Amino acid sequence: MNNDLEQKYHFACELAKQAGLIAKGYQNQLLEGNLAIDVKGHQDFVSDADRETEKYIRTQLESAYPQDGFLGEESGATDEYRTGVWVVDPIDGTTNFLRKQSLWCVSIAYLVEGEPVIGVIYDPNLDELFHARKGEGAYLNGKPMEVYQGSEAVVGLVNLGYSPKMPLDNYLSTMQRLLDNGIEHRRHGSAALGLAHVAAGRFDGYREDFINAWDIMAGVVILREAKADVATNQIEGGYTIQASIPAITELLAG
Ligand code: 2AM
Ligand code: CA
């Protein structure tokens, strides 16, 4: 079983990189004005880039690991599986992607009995692969990552996400609490990349009060392995997530 997981980990790393290059190819087409965009809902868009990148990932996984299940943002879930389940966001930060910006990524997680054990996040714009396997540490392009373990946040910087599915007041009160304590915030619009960047020490925390499994599962493994504090709660239709260096965990939670 362990060997199997090791093989899946390597497979996921290569797959995320391939998928990232495919998505990047679509963004290049977009820059040339050749990509159709569909509206899924208010401020929610999808393009062939999302669908085709997910299709590529799904096909590769289904042919390599037919006994595994799959859950993807664009194509939904398989009904039955015998082993674990792959949870995939082909492009996290779709709005950034479609607005010709660079903060987006591919996110691939593997869960066994509901627990994420492999997490891979690839940013093709910077050629950065954030990767972790449970019990084996977290890495950025093969280099170990561990978050600051001290008790003081020297210059605090937190990444926030906002979903219209939660009261605006949740978001505003988090922002206020951070500002009152001298901590700055950003809202970059890709939860997966935001979480990876906490693991890499570029942010001290990430919080979002309504988020989907495919946005966060890879990040959860990476953050846990980077020794960040990670709290997720399953709520109706999704999750909450708070992840941070230990020094600001209480403050971020409120
Ligand atoms: P996406 O880019 O794949 O759509 C930004 O706060 C994060 O929230 C992104 O990871 C984004 O994923 C996700 N997101 C977008 N719309 C959302 C919604 N209506 N509810 C929850 N999360 C959403
Ligand atoms: Ca997403």
Image (cartoon, rainbow, N blue to C red):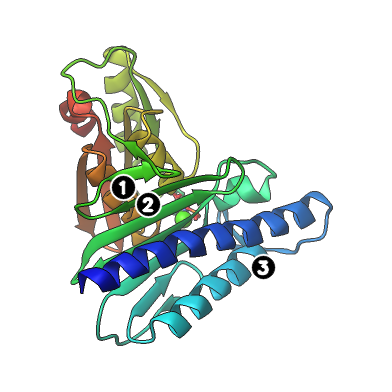
Q: Nearer the viewer, residue 20 or 235?
A: 20
Is 165 placed left or right of 19 in the picture? Answer: left
For the N terminus, the quadrant is bottom left
Q: Is mark 2 within 8 Å of ligand 1?
A: yes
Q: Residues within 10 Å of mark 2 (few under 14, many from 20)?
A: few
Amino acid at dot 2: Lys
Residue holding disc 3: 48
Q: Which secondary structure, mark 1? A: helix
Residue holding disc 1: 222
Residue holding disc 2: 165
Q: Which secondary structure, mark 3? A: helix
Amino acid at dot 1: Ile
* Residue at the image position 21 percent from the left and 25 percent from the top: 248
Which label's residue is closer to the chain start, 1 or 3?
A: 3
For the C terminus, the quadrant is top left
Which label's residue is closer to the chain start, 3 or 2?
A: 3
**Number of numbered discs overlaid on the protein picture:** 3
Residue 110 position (above or below residue 91): below
| x, y percent for residue 114 | 20, 68
Report how far apart the C-alphas of labels 1 and 3 lie in the structure: 28 Å
